[in-house]
């Protein structure tokens, strides 16, 4: 697991051993959700306002997320991503 970024109390992560389509894991309190890099919720639940914040962040950083996904899949160290620009 690698922490890519934090958006307030939301932690954005990628896991080294994931083999499915490109996605991130979103951790908030006790909940962990899975969102693809197009901003679609794949697993879990997120309050609507937080989901919109995360989706906007994903779309702003899509290239960086895709690059990190490729790095993780090949065993390389991903890079942290700024919370907001």
Image (cartoon, helix red, strand yellow):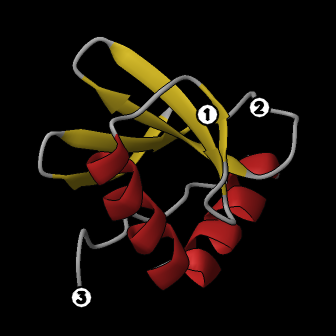
Numbered disc 1: secondary structure: loop
Q: Which mark is residue 15?
A: 1
Position of 78 with respect to 69 (left or right) is left
Q: Which mark is residue 18?
A: 2
Residue 73 percent across, percent down from the top left: 80, 48
Q: Are marks 2 and 1 in contact (CB under 8 Å)?
A: yes
Task: Give the answer, above or below, for where 7 lies relative to 84.
Answer: above
Residue 4 percent across, percent down from the top left: 40, 53
What is the C-alpha distance between the residues marked 2 and 1?
6 Å
Relative depth, front residue between 68 and 37: 37
What is the C-alpha distance between the residues marked 2 and 3?
28 Å
Instruction: Please identify, in this view, whether the residue under mark 1 or under mark 3 is nearer the observer.
Output: 3
Residue 3 percent across, percent down from the top left: 38, 43
Instruction: Please identify, in this view, whether the residue under mark 2 or under mark 3 is nearer the observer.
Output: 3
Tag 1: Cα neighbours inside 10 Å, few (<14), some, or many (≥20)?
some
Position of 10 with respect to 70 (left or right) is left
- Upstream in sequence: badge 1 or badge 3: 1
Numbered disc 2: secondary structure: loop
Q: Are marks 2 and 3 in contact (CB under 8 Å)?
A: no
Numbered disc 3: secondary structure: loop
Q: Quadrant of the C terminus?
A: bottom left
Tag 3: Cα neighbours inside 10 Å, few (<14), some, or many (≥20)?
few
Numbered disc total: 3
- Upstream in sequence: badge 2 or badge 3: 2
Residue that numbered label 3 is attached to: 85
Task: Give the answer, above or below, for where 84 lies relative to 43.
Answer: below
Residue under the image location 53 percent in, 77 percent down: 59
Residue at the far left in the pictured view: 8
């Amino acid at each position: 697991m690698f922490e890519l970024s934090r958006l307030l109390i939301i932690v954005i992560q990628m896991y080294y051993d994931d083999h499915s389509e490109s996605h991130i894991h979103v951790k908030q309190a006790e909940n962990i959700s899975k969102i693809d890099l197009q901003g679609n919720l794949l697993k879990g639940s997120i309050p609507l306002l937080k989901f919109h914040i995360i989706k906007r962040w994903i779309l702003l950083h899509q290239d960086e997320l895709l690059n990190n996904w490729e790095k993780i899949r090949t065993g390389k160290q991903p890079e942290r991503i700024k919370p907001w620009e």
